[in-house]
Image: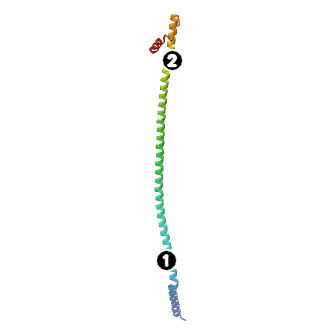
Amino acid sequence: MSITGTLIVQMIVFLILVGFTMKYVWPPIAKALDDRAAKIAEGLAAADKAKSELSAANKRVEAELGQARNESAQRLADAERRAQAIVEEAKARATEEGNKIVAAARVEADQQAVKAREALREQVAALAVKGAEQILRKEVNAGVHADLLARLQTEL
């Protein structure tokens, strides 16, 4: 055989091989490559979607954390105001109780002063009677001179 015949036979075999490959081998390979590309595209889209969802979730978490911080700060401020009000109320009650105690003590002191004055008047009257008795050197009857003693008591 000559080189030309061999070359022609090889071309025919090559063309048959190319035709067979294009008809039976290439479509499944192309389909597998397309399926793989579609899966990769889906994975990338899912990754982008997950990334955006993660970003949105992070924003929501930050917003909720900010809101929780604000609420806790507000509750703390309310508690501090309430504590201050309780302290002020307790101070007011203590002052009021102190004033009542002082007023009661003043009333009691006034009553005791009046009692002491009365007792002192009686003692002074008794001393005056004894002094007068000693001056007169005779016994004075308290029942007879009760009016005199009452006047003396009121003058003192």
Tell me which label, 2 or 1, sits earlier in the chain.
1
> Does residue 81 sit above or below 45 in this rendering?
above
Residue corresponding to mark 1: 34
Numbered tag placed on residue 128 in the rendering: none
Residue at image location 49% in from the left, 65% down from the top: 50
Q: State the residue lying farthest toward the front.
A: 144
> Does residue 20 sit above or below 84 in this rendering?
below
Residue at image location 48% in from the left, 42% down from the top: 83
Do the residues bearing badges 2 and 1 touch, measured as CB atoms within 8 Å? Answer: no
Residue at image location 48% in from the left, 60% down from the top: 57
x then y, percent, for residue 124: 50, 13
Q: CA distance from mark 2 to mark 1?
A: 124 Å
- Relative to the observer, which residue lies in front, 50 or 125? 125
x then y, percent, for residue 94: 49, 34
Q: Residues within 10 Å of mark 2 (few under 14, many from 20)?
A: few
Give the amino acid at mark 2. Answer: Ala
x then y, percent, for residue 52: 46, 64
x then y, percent, for residue 60: 46, 58
Q: Secondary structure at mark 1?
A: helix
Image quadrant in which the N terminus is located? bottom right
Give the amino acid at mark 1. Answer: Asp
> Does residue 31 sit above or below 52 in this rendering?
below
Residue corresponding to mark 2: 119
